[in-house]
Amino acid sequence: MRILLVGEYSRLHNSLKEGLEIFNHEVTIIATGDSFKQFPVDYSIFPKFFLNNSFLDFCNKILFRLFKIDLQLAEKGIRFWRFLPQLKDYDVVQLINSNAIETYPFFSKYLLKKLFNQNKKSFLLVCGEDTPIIDFMLKDALKYSILSPLLQNKELESNYHFSLKYTQNNYRNLYNFIESNTCKTIVSDLDYKIPLPEKILIPNPININKINFQPLDASEKIIIFLGKNKNSEIKKGISYFEQALKIISQKYDDKVRVIIVENIPYKKYITSYNNAHILLDQVYSYDQGYNALEAMAKGKVVFTGAEIEFTTYYNITERVCINAMPDVNYLVNELSFLIENPDEIISIGNRARAFIESEHNYIKIAQKYLKSWETN
């Protein structure tokens, strides 16, 4: 089959592509590469005209501040439009999000109409923030979510511009248009299955052949790693980790080393925690996101989502990661236990790798996508 994957935010589509190619399918990715993360793509719609020119970027920021006009969005759409003649005759088109083209919603709708009409089956993947996900979280029906800080403090609204845009009529109409013009909607983990229980869940694919398992040695200092993304640190609850690390650093000064990085490209990020024993991911999730899964594949002990919904769904009886929660004392206690019981670090790291091989093997996941697409 010829398969077109539209959008890339986490390396999900790259890993899926690698799995599909094992079965000799022809796979193409068109995306921006997601800003500073610089994920590989086949056709790039990155807005380099503005972002590679500091003067034009400055002018665009002024335009946005005064008139809410973002020429970067227009440039992404124009670049996608120029690729349209090459995006024909695919058996499957999959959007990674309703905003996969990352342009103005009316322009996305125009481009997607053409894209859908010149290809066979089309599908929508929900693996992050999108209209029904934000709608559900705004109901405050769960004990916590990425919107919890906003629901507790309305003054944080400016930090949630990206999230809340999906509730605007133009983005809502775009989502509805896509859902009514695609064959099926797929979700990638329980954080999206819970709001959309009727949708099929296909777990994130992890290329276990590219990510080597690194057996941990806890005989010396325990290395704790925290990677920060300035745009999402409030939604991930990074401040809870930072507060916990201050306490841990003082409590175990001679036993731990803390590494913190911020906004680095994916190729650098994926190797920046190679020597770490523990990786701090996020506190507001119920299942693991992509960064957490890749770290688990390396055999790290990851603080991330591992709520009862996760352990029940996968029938987990022993910890493969640490369920992180927005509670500093809880995080300090969990970190302290690991530091004082280094053998448990080794055990969890080994189970983490085994879990990824069992449930997230990119070849097995590619087969699940193929079955879902073909049996529509």
Image (tube, rainbow, N blue to C red):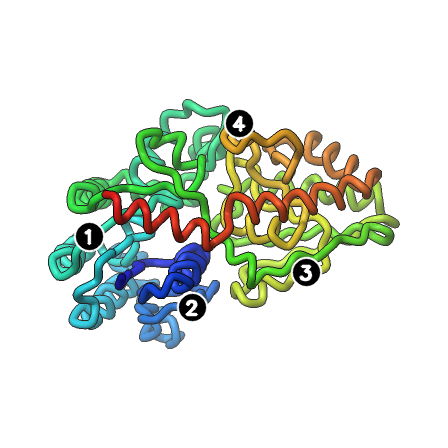
Q: Is residue 275 above or below residue 141?
A: below
Between 25 and 81, the residue placed more toward the observer is 25
**Regarding mark 3 in the picture, which secondary structure is present there?**
loop
User: Residue 22 occupies which quadrant of the picture?
Assistant: bottom left
Residue named by callout 4: 312
Q: Residues within 10 Å of mark 1 (few under 14, many from 20)?
A: many
How far apart in space, not on screen, are marks 2 and 3 (Cα)? 21 Å
Spot occupied by residue 277 in the image (x, y as percentages of width and height):
73, 51
Label 2 element class: loop
Residue 238 picture quarter: top right
The earlier-in-sequence mark between 4 and 3 is 3
Residue 84 badge: none
- Could you give the CA–CA distance between mark 1 and mark 3, rounded to whole angstroms? 40 Å
Of 124 and 9, the residue lying toward us: 124
The residue depicted at 35 percent of the width and 73 percent of the height is 48
Circle nearer the N terminus (2, 1): 2
Q: Which mark is residue 40?
A: 2
Which residue is identified by label 1? Answer: 121
Residue 239 seen: yes
Residue 154: x percent and y percent?
42, 33
Instruction: Please provide percent x and percent y for residue 57.
Output: 36, 70
Q: At label 2, which amino acid type do we have?
A: Pro
Residue type for callout 3: Asn
The nearer-to-camera label among 2 and 1 is 1
- CA gap, disc 4 to disc 3? 30 Å
